[in-house]
Amino acid sequence: MSPLDLRPTLVMGARGHIGKHVLDGLSARGLPVRASVRTLAPGRFPAGVAVFAADLTDPTSLTLAFDGVAQVFLYANHEGVAGVIAAARETGVERIVLLSSGSVIHPTSAGNAITEEHREVEDAFAAASDLVVVPIRPLVLATNALGWVYSIRATGSLPLYRPDAVTAPIHERDIAAVAVAALTGSPSPRLSELLTGPTGISQREQVAAIAAAAGRDITVAELTRDDALAQFSRFMPAAEAEAVLEFLDDADAGNSPTTSTVGDILGRPATDIGAWAVDHASDFC
Ligand SMILES: NC(=O)c1ccc[n+]([C@@H]2O[C@H](COP(=O)([O-])OP(=O)(O)OC[C@H]3O[C@@H](n4cnc5c(N)ncnc54)[C@H](OP(=O)(O)O)[C@@H]3O)[C@@H](O)[C@H]2O)c1
């Protein structure tokens, strides 16, 4: 993309945990931005930001939202890729930064439903070789812990499957910063390497960090696999619930790595879980 190109960047999912930081990061650099959400609601974005209603599964909405933008940040959605590709070609989008998943390139995650849905999206974009598409690949989001809010707030205790499984959760702001680097710099394979937080930490230690930041006691109870499957299946399709348990089994077996990619790309250390817990302390009170 030409540095003189003043066409805006569209941030889809601009209310999402990662998307909102992408929008903020581009705005903070003084770059022209456009936001999209699936359902318009007043008052959510800074004055001057044009907001479109766009759904990755609705090609007509995509053509309208893409028209006049130079590049797009978007979430992986395996149901909408063909329409995204067609809309990008029709409107002359020059670069797409795709929030994908590190599981696509993490060998022991291969085969589970969540990994393969992300791979399907990546493969479809890779086949559209006339488009520049940069996948961003975090392995484990720190925001997964927001799924613990209800139990912690309601009972002060948290039932967990594999509480001693170690992962390196990554702060949503760090993922967004890498996406902003991909939207503002030259394409580089480094941008698509596995993204993690700075250190491995068990789920139990994550809970302790949240308890310290929120100033409250939280007890951890261990869930059986059957109970965990039933619990996750209340919020997601059964195959995805099984995939979550497989990620945790894999982590418990010592297979969830820590990488230096965030620091290498951003030139500053990745954010640790203690700082994430401070940022989100009020969610848990
Ligand atoms: N959980 C993990 O450990 C993990 C690991 C690796 C990668 N990931 C990836 O990270 C994503 C979660 O990121 P996040 O925390 O920022 O999620 P989030 O806060 O739940 O936000 C998701 C955003 O996606 C948008 N969206 C969903 N479906 C859409 C559609 N059909 N058309 C347009 N926009 C749509 C939503 O838009 P609206 O606000 O308009 O509804 C929302 O803003 C996952 O979906 C996964 O792909 C997760």
Image (tube, rainbow, N blue to C red):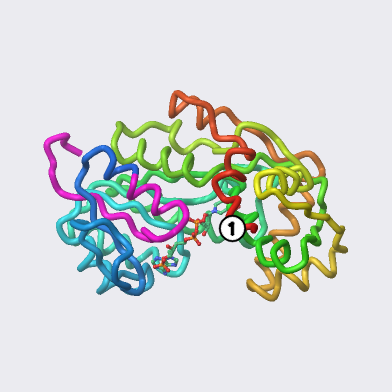
Q: Quadrant of the C terminus?
A: bottom right
At horizontal 39% and vertical 42% (from top left) the residue drawn is 179
Residue range (magenta): 1-24
Does 191 sit left or right of 159 as displayed? left
For residue 147, above or below residue 271: below
**Callout 1 secondary element:** helix
Q: Amino acid at mark 1?
A: Asp
**Viewer-proximal residue among 80 and 29:** 29
For residue 54, above or below residue 186: below
Q: Position of residue 166 (x, y in %)?
A: 75, 41
The residue singled out by tag 1 in the image is 283
At horizontal 34% and vertical 52% (from top left) the residue drawn is 73
Does 262 sit left or right of 200 as displayed? left
For residue 38, above or below residue 100: below
**Viewer-proximal residue among 123 and 100:** 100
For residue 183, above or below residue 10: above
